[in-house]
Amino acid sequence: MNSKILFIEPPRNFWFVMGEYLPPPSALLILAAYVERELPGIDIDIVDCQADQLDWKGLERYIESVNPSIVITSGFTTNAYTCARTCEIAKTVNKDIVTIVGGIHFSFTPEESLQSFPEIDYIVRGEGELTVVDLFKTLENKGKISEVKGISYRKNSKIVHNPGRPLIQNLDILPYPAYHLVEEKLRRYHFTMMAGRNTRYMILEGARGCDHQCTFCTQWNHWGSRWRTKSAKRIADEIEFLHETYGGVFFWFADDHMKLSSRGNQLYEELRQKQCKDDVMLFFQARIDDIARHPDLITKLRKVGTYWILCGVETDSQELLNEYKKGVKTQDAYQAMKIMSQNDIFSQATFVIGARRDTHESIERLREYSHELTPDLAIYTALTPFPGTIYYETAKKNGWIEDTNYANYDMAHAIMSTESLTKKEVQEELWNCYRSFYGSITKNITRVLSKNNRKRIVYRHMAGQYVLEKFRRLI
Ligand code: B12
Ligand code: SF4
C-alpha cells in the first residue's frame, strides 16, 4: 500500500482528580497493531503529543514533516474536541489528508459530529479493527465506500451511515498492542499516584463490553450489549510479553467488567505459572456484587499481582441503584470493601451525585455512607449524560441538560440540576463531598499513619489543596 498513516494522540487535558499521570495511547496502539499485521508493508507512525511534549503548533509541524495521506485519532466525550482540532490541523497542512476518527463518543454522535466538524472525513463506529482495515483498502483501491460496514461520512454534502459491522467473535485473534511503535517513549508512561513516577504504566484489554445495562453507562451499548473476553491464557501471555519485552509493571485492565465469576479462577491459574506475577501491579475494575460473591478469587488474584481494584459503588440509595439498573445491593458494597481490606488490596470506590431526586439531605446521606464504607480512595462524580446512554436520551427529552460543552463531560463538572438543586448547588455538593472525606486529618488518622506507603501517598494527594481547590473553583 502507498498510504502513509499517522496515528495521533492529540494534546489533552488531564483528569486533575487523579494527580499527575501520562497514559499510553491505548486505543491507537491496539488499532495500529491490527493494521500493521493485516496490511504488512504499510507505513505507520504514531505521534503522542503528551509523551512528545507537542502543543498544537508542534503537532502541525509534525504533520508537515511526516506528510501523511491518512490521519487517525481517537477520543471519548470529554476530549472529542481534541480529535476535531487534530483533523482541522491536518487539513490546514494539506487539504488532501484523509481524516478518520472513532471511539465511543463519535460512534454515538456520527450525525451531529459530521455536521459540527467538516474537517472529519470518516467516523468509524463501534469496534474499529476490521472496519479501519476495510476502509484503508477501499480508499487505496478506490473501491466502493458505500460497502464499508460501520462507517459514517459525507457524500455529495449528505451524511451517510453505512450499516454496522458484526463484532469480532474471538478476541484472541487480535495481536498484542503495538507498544513497539512508541518504544522510545515507554519510560514516560506513568501514573504517579497509583504506582509511582518511575513505574512503567501500560494498558491492556482483557475483555470488551458488559452484559449489564446501567442507565448512565456507554460501554454496554458501545459493545453491543455483550461481554467478550480474551482467553485467560492469552491475557496472562500478554502481561508476560509486555513485562518481559517492554518492562511494563503497572498494568491497567481496560475491561469495564472484570467478571470474576467467569474467568477469575482461570486467570489466577494462568498467572500463577508466570514468573512476572511477583513483579507486576495489576489494576482492574470490578462490580461490588462480583467481589462480594467471590472473596476466594480476590485472595487468589492478590497472590498474582492484583493490588488495586476500582468499584462503582454509585450511591447509598437502593431505589436509585434500581433506577440506574445497576443490579447490586447496597449491602454488597460493605462486603466488597471488607474483602479488599482483608486481602490488603487498595480499594477505590466511585460515587455519583446529581440524580433528579437528589437533595442536600440525600447527598449528605451518600457522604455518610461513603465514610462508613471506608474505601482507601473515594471518588465522587457528577451524574453525566454521556451520548449513548439511556440517561442521555431521558435527559435530552426532558430538557435537563444545561451544559452542552462536551469538554466539561469529565464527571467533575456538574452538567444538570436536580429537581431541587441548581447545577451550581450540585457542583458545590461535589466539593463538599471531597472536603468531607479528605478535609479532616483527625477523621483520616489511620490513612495518615498507614503502614501502607500507597495509602499515605494517595491520602496526601487527595487532601492537598490541589484537588480541593480545583473543585472549589468549579463552583
Ligand atoms: C484507561 C482509561 C483511562 C485512562 C487513560 C486512557 C487513555 N489511553 O487515554 C485514564 C485513567 C487516564 C482515563 C481518564 C479518564 N477517563 Co477513562 N477509561 C479508560 C478505559 C478503562 C480504557 C480505555 C481503553 O484503552 N480502551 C480500549 C480501547 C481499545 O477501546 P476503545 O477506545 O473503545 O476503542 C475501540 C473502538 O471504540 C474503536 N476506536 C476507538 N477509537 C478509534 C479511532 C479510530 C480512528 C477508529 C477507526 C476506531 C476507534 O476501535 C477500538 C478497538 O476496537 C475506558 C473504558 C474502556 N473500556 O474503554 C475508560 C473511559 C474511556 N474513561 C472514561 C472517563 C469518563 C474518563 C475521565 C473523564 C474521568 C473518569 N471519571 O475516569 C478521564 C478523562 C481523562 C481526559 N481528560 O482525557 C469513560 C468515557 C465515557 C464517555 N462516553 O466518554 C470510559 C468509557 C469509562 C466508562 N466506563 O465510562 N481513562
Ligand atoms: S457501569 Fe459497569 S456494570 Fe454497569 S453497564 Fe457499565 S460497565 Fe457494565
Image (cartoon, grey):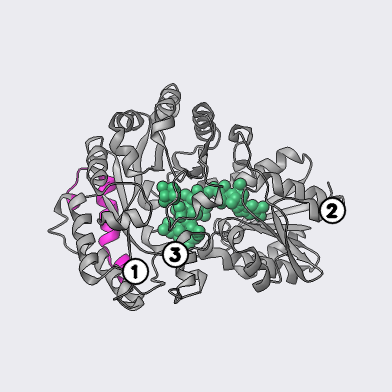
Residues 63 and 26: in front is 26
Q: Amino acid at mark 3?
A: Asp
Q: Is label 3 within 8 A of ligand 1 (CB to nearest ligand atom)?
A: yes
Q: Amino acid at mark 1?
A: Arg
| Residue 343 image position (x, y, % from top left) | 26, 35
Q: Which residue is mark 2?
A: 144
- Magenta segment includes 382: no
Q: Secondary structure at mark 1?
A: loop
Q: Is label 1 within 8 A of ligand 2 (CB to nearest ligand atom)?
A: no
Q: Is label 2 within 8 A of ligand 1 (CB to nearest ligand atom)?
A: no
Asked whether, in this view, residue 333 is left or right of residue 11, the answer is left
In this rendering, is residue 75 above or below 26?
Answer: below
Lower position in the chain sequence, tag 3 or tag 1: 1
Residues 174 and 105: in front is 105
Q: Which residues are magenta?
A: 447-470
Residues 57 and 9: in front is 9
- Magenta segment includes 456: yes
User: Dot 1, how many residues are within 10 Å of its Cα: few (below 14), some (14-19), or many (20+)?
Assistant: some
